Image: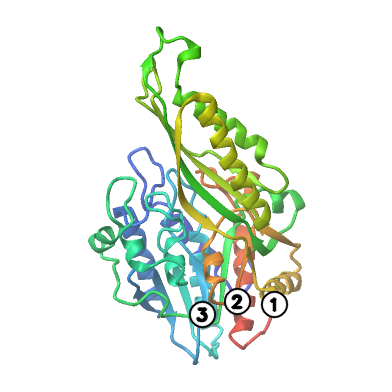
Amino acid sequence: MSAGIDGRVLLARLRELGEVGRDARGRLVRLAASDADRAGRDLLARWLQGAGLEVAVDAIGNLFGIWQAGAGQPVMVGSHIDTVIDAGIYDGCYGVLAGLAVVEALRAEGLVPARPLAVAAFTNEEGVRFAPDMMGSLVHAGGLDLAEALASIGTDGTVLGEELRRIGYAGSMVPGTIRPAAYLELHVEQGPVLEQDAAAIGAVADLQGISWQRLRIEGRANHAGTTPMALRQDAGHAAARIVTGLRALAEGGTVATVGSLRLEPDAINVIPGAAVLTVDLRDPDEGRLAAAEAALSGLVAEVAAAEGVAITTERLARFQPVRFDPALVARIEQAAAKRGLPVRRMTSGAGHDAQMLARICPSAMIFVPSRDGISHNPAEYTAPEALVAGAEVLLDVVRGLLGADRGPG
């Protein structure tokens, strides 16, 4: 492995953190502000302290390890450690632990930075238990009111602020107190592009806009055997028409997904009287994303009229596409090239904390390949050498931002 990053330690930490939050079925389930999240945070905090960093927690639970060196605004690196249900071990965690590895490598070099360096683990990036996703970084960047975020009701009926207090991670620091000079996030791609192109590094130039909505369809529950087809107000069939209609309206660079669908009363011999489904629309172009939202609205009206049902729509999240800082993207490309690593400039299909930090400072992302493009799945995998290579590129870029650009060696 390359000099600089201690790959053995980085990989061991990824495996160890990946065992925190296993449920009775062996699934990795470390949802935001849960007991498992507390255990993961406690482990990370010990590692940060062990590296000589000052640990700080803000009021939304964002966890920071700060190297108080130099003066002025810090360079910040990081991601998140909360997971989806039945997760892999790399998503988010890799960026946080690689950031810690960068600090340790720079300290081992005897570097005296010209400015501070901060490692961040943002709260509730996944948005599985509490909405919206990327919540901690959004609050940090001033895009969501703290009180509103803390009042968020979880899928299990809990309140985020109460849960953060319960697990001991409702900090006293005002979110946004640490205002970065620049933010870098290293992440597994979660898609197939780098692997298909045989590229080792992705220099992420932009990130798709995201629109999340929840639709509730109200029909009429009735007997499955005695109600003629023409006389039904079938919420399930209306939901199916929306699901299939979404596939037709996803054109150009737009992607559309129904990731959650629930029928009521959910009985084999009862026509569904209600259906609740979520719609996830994404596109790197704001105009196309807005057009897809308008097309969805038209589809909903059409289905409601045709099926004799009432449909209400609730917006869960809406983020515009993000263009990352061109100078930082160029630094990533240059660092990869110096190490002889094939690099591709690309778009992120997933949302990340970096898109929120881009509101307040120059930001960019580094991707490494994901085998078969799989993520949010226990089969998520990136080769050890690829993980270390990405961390080395992060190290080189951070070193340059701190005022001591030595390059690989």
- Residue at image point 32% right, 66% down: 147
Q: Nearer the viewer, residue 80 or 94?
A: 80
Of callouts 3 and 1, the N-terminal one: 3
Of callouts 3 and 2, the N-terminal one: 3
Q: Nearer the viewer, residue 382 or 275?
A: 275
Coordinates of residue 124 in the picture (x, y in percent):
41, 58
For label 3, the residue is: 180
Q: Nearer the viewer, residue 356 or 202?
A: 356
Q: Is residue 380 left or right of residue 405?
A: left
Q: Is residue 267 left or right of residue 232?
A: left
Q: How many marks?
A: 3
Disc number placed over residue 362 in the picture, else none: 2
Amino acid type, label 3: Pro
For label 1, the residue is: 327
Separation (CA) of disc 3 from disc 1: 16 Å
Amino acid type, label 2: Pro
Coordinates of residue 208 in the picture (x, y in percent):
62, 56
Separation (CA) of disc 2 from disc 1: 9 Å
Coordinates of residue 42 in the picture (x, y in percent):
32, 64
Regarding mark 1 in the picture, which secondary structure is present there?
helix
Q: Nearer the viewer, residue 19 or 361?
A: 361
